[in-house]
Image (spheres, rainbow, N blue to C red):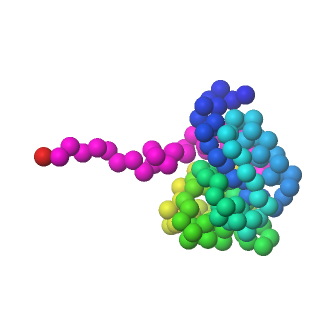
Amino acid sequence: MWSNALVTQDLSVLVVDDDDLQRRFLAALLDRAGVGQIYWANNGRTALEMFRRGPQVDVVVCDLLMPEMDGQTFLTLLHDEGHSPSVVIASGADSDTRREMEDTASRLGMRVLGFLSKPVSLDALLALFEKHEPRAAASATPDVAGP
C-alpha cells in the first residue's frame, strides 16, 4: 500500500468515465491508494444525479469525451448546482481540448489538480492528489486580532 495512505483515507472520489475498463481500473488504483470513498459513473448525467443524491465528493476524476454528457458540460452543470470539487482530468483528448477544459473548470472556481493520460499510473494519480486541499483548509482564513 502507498506509504501516505493517511492523505487519501479521508478523500471521497468520483470517477466519471464512459469506458468500463478505465472506470474499474481507476477505482482499483484509488482503492490501492487507500481512498476512503470511491464512487463511479459512466457519464456526466449519471454523475450529476449522484451529486444531487448527496454523497460528499472531494475530487472528481473525469474523462472529457463521453456520450450523453461530456466532461465539460458535466463540470459546468455541477458548478451551477453549487458544487466545486477538485478536478483531475483523465483523458486521451488532445492538449487543446484539455487546456480548454482546465480554463472552464478554473473559471467556475474548481481547482484543477492536473491531467492524467490513459492508462493512468498510481504514482501520477497520487502526485495530483497531493495538491488537493481539504475544504476546511481551502476556505480557512487567518485569524485577525481586533484593535
Is residue 120 part of the magenta span, yes or no?
yes
Residue 83 visible from this viewpoint: yes
- Left/right of residue 23 with respect to residue 89 in the rendered view: right
Vertically, is 128 above or below 87?
above
Residue ID at (61%, 66%): 78
Residue at the right extreme of this rendering: 21
Q: Where is residue 121 in the image (x, y as percent from the top left)?
A: 74, 41
Q: Where is residue 99 in the image (x, y as percent from the top left)?
A: 61, 63
Is residue 135 part of the magenta span, yes or no?
yes
Taking depth in this image into account, of 121 and 134 the one nearest to the observer is: 134
Residue at the front extreme of this rendering: 53
- Left/right of residue 140 with respect to residue 51 in the rendered view: left
- Left/right of residue 20 with respect to residue 108 in the rendered view: right
- Left/right of residue 88 with respect to residue 29 in the rendered view: left
Q: Position of residue 94 (x, y in %)?
A: 71, 63
Q: Where is residue 83 in the image (x, y as percent from the top left)?
A: 56, 62
- Give the quadrant of the N terminus: top right
Residue ID at (17%, 46%): 146
Residue range in magenta is 117-146
Residue ID at (64%, 36%): 9
Taking depth in this image into account, of 97 and 12 the one nearest to the observer is: 12
Vertically, is 72 above or below 118?
below
Residue ID at (65%, 54%): 55
Vertically, is 1 above or below 25?
above
Q: In which quarter of the image is residue 92?
A: bottom right
Count of number-bearing discs: 0
